[in-house]
Amino acid sequence: MKCLLYKEDQGGRKALEYGLLDPRLGACKRNELCETCGLDYQACIGHWGYFDLPAPVYHTCSRVLIPDSVRSKYLQNCSNTSLEYIQKKVLRKAVHKLANKPSVCRYCGALNGTVKKGTGLSYIIHDVSKLVGKNVDEYVDKLSAAIDTNPELPALARKCVETIRPARALQLFSKIPTEDLPLLLMPFGCEWATHPRNLILQRIPVPPNAIRPSVVSEVKSGTNEDDLTQMYQWILAQAATLEEDIPEADQIACLDNLHAEVARIINSQYTGLPPVQDHKFMRGLLQRLSGKHGRFRGNLLGKRTNYTARTVISPDPNLRIDQVCVPVHCAKLLTYPERVTQFNIDFLRKLVLNGPNTHPGALFVSYRATARDVQNAEPGKGLQAGGILKKYLANKRIQENVAKTLRVGDLVERHLIDGDIVLFNRQPSLHRVSIQAMKATVKPNRTFRFNPCCCTPFNADFDGDEMNIHLPQTEEARAEAKHLMLTLKNISSPKNGEPLISPIQDLITATHLLTLKDVFFTRDQACQLACQIVSGNHIGRPLELPPPAIMWPTRLWTGKQIFSLILAPHPSSEVKISLRVPTKSIYSGRGEELCPNDGFVVIYNSELLAGCMDKKLLGGGSKASIFYSILRDYGGEACADAMWRLGRISLFYLAHRGFSIGIGEVTPCPVLCAAKEQLIKQGAKVCPEPRLRASPMISPYLMTYYFPNCLCVS
């Protein structure tokens, strides 16, 4: 391969044949075709090249020294293809330990010392000082022939250190016979790929042009070359210098530079690499694959696609569990291609007149070109009568003209509007319900908002989390999302059927306070609470306030009656559930519905007769909850309606009642502290071991305080 990139005699900067930008490596520009496969830049997959190095280079004894009696045993075990990975590691460790025992090779008499990494990149060190011991003079005499030609060797020979450069390592690896390969856990039959000599680089692969494209500079004439192309140029320059007739000292320096440039291509942040000119950060192959923006995390695991939006999430209990609030800014950018029919032509005509900047509007209209469109089209576009013409609604004149000529069969790319099916996802997507279908609601805010009851399947919280929205682009995709992925279809867990979506935190607190037995409301207050469920899609639905629980001296309604409206807002409601369940922490254990703590819940025909709500009956993923009974008997739609009514009424009540918690609420009382101390003292008496080892998390002072008779060993 040649170091130059372009032909010098042509001003068009045509890529040089056998250069790093050879057109046979693949097409990466719009107006060119690949000379290998003949495809354009979108269809060509790229083709690899290579060039040979003038000297072997490291990729960042000739026999395995174990006795023949043991060799056959390990060869048989290592050749077993059914071994697990851990078993292979144990075998490799045993072979390595046996091979390190001999100090002298019984085949050639060479010393088997310690091999370690050198200070540079171009050699490793073979240290035999422990084996030579006091016989340094004899060791130096063996190297007398080499010392006569290289005056620097005596100092190294006295240290009993040998530098092994890639050429020497390649020579040793090449002598390893194929029958010893299983001892290195390398299989038979493909020595061309798995032989140890392949660990030494003699040839450098060159990636296709599409991986390292050239960017035409608009500021100055010429192109800006990719980092990989520049690093390959430096390698070719060093290789060309090595092939020249230069002194030996310069050859060693040039070889060191060649190693550095090859290592820079693999990992540009490798320790010990000389700095680049102008201290520019170069991206090697490792940097392109690893990290947050690498190929794996950035392109394979975390894709960036069209028709998606991403922003911070925030709670909105006024939304249904199958709704997500989308900012109007995102709704203007997310488009859906809707086909014009006789039923929606008037609606889509209004969207076309609104244009791209007014919501709800449209951005593009695709229609079949007429003869007049072909006549007015720019030359060179190849537009024919009957072909598809896509027009951007850039100004008012275009919008009015397109709206007048809009006809059945045209395609309008409109804004995202209320009721559209979107996919709502939070990464990492650890299970199936991490991505669900919801109905969009466009509002003038800056965050995605959804009901906090839906936090559990997404594992989301509102401390700065971000989530994604994907807008399906076909009717088939919308139908699949609606019938398979909608939140109403995924309220229960696929693991055991327990509800994943249920009231949490303030909703449980407010409902518990609402259903206490000393909570009463006047008619005005009761009507105000009941009217909270007359909103959105529930406007016009029947609602009837039950008869008051107290008639004289003034008519009063209990909180339990208001809670009954959540389950069945009207006597004719189809949801009729009946439960007899004790609460988790309030029930006294006697009396059931006559429990003095009001801890036994009795519901008959969706009317709360006794008991107050707690987490067991409202949330927590339990099959004893009210919403699981509604989901099981009446489906997801009825369950979502009841959950929405609960959020509306309970939070309105809590906002007007007020609720706070102090440090005294979570401070242990003196009785609990005394019981804890008594328990610790009993444990100290029972413990038979007088010497206790303290945990790193426990202070020695606490140990000596609670165990005065024991010795604490830290």
Image (tube, helix red, strand yellow):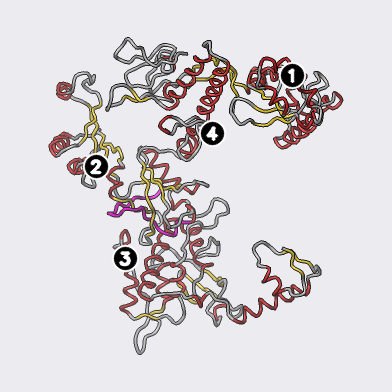
| Image quarter of the C terminus | bottom right
Does the CB distance between marks 1 and 4 fall below 8 Å?
no
Does the CB distance between marks 4 and 2 fall below 8 Å?
no
**Gap between marks 3 and 4, in whole Å?**
66 Å
Q: In which quadrant of the rendered view does residue 606 lie?
A: bottom left
Of mark 1 and mark 4, the one earlier in the sequence is: 1
Does the CB distance between marks 2 and 3 fall below 8 Å?
no
Q: Residue at x 58, y 17 (%)?
A: 202
What label does residue 270 carry, if any?
A: 4
Of mark 3 and mark 1, the one earlier in the sequence is: 1
Residue, far right: 69
Q: Residue at x 57, y 73 (%)?
A: 585
Image vertical order of residue 582 relative to residue 267, above or below: below
**Gap between marks 3 and 1, in whole Å?**
99 Å
In magenta stretch: residue 444: yes
Residue 565 drawn at (x, y percent): 39, 70
Q: Which residue is mark 1?
A: 143
Region of the chain picked out in magenta, as a range: 437-455
**Gap between marks 1 and 4, in whole Å?**
34 Å
Residue 455 drawn at (x, y percent): 46, 56
Of mark 3 and mark 4, the one earlier in the sequence is: 4
Mark 3 residue element: loop
Q: Residues within 10 Å of mark 2 (few under 14, many from 20)?
A: few
Callout 3 amino acid:
Val
**Gap between marks 4 and 2, in whole Å?**
62 Å
Mark in front: 4 vs 2: 4
**Gap between marks 2 and 3, in whole Å?**
30 Å
What label does residue 534 carry, if any?
A: 3
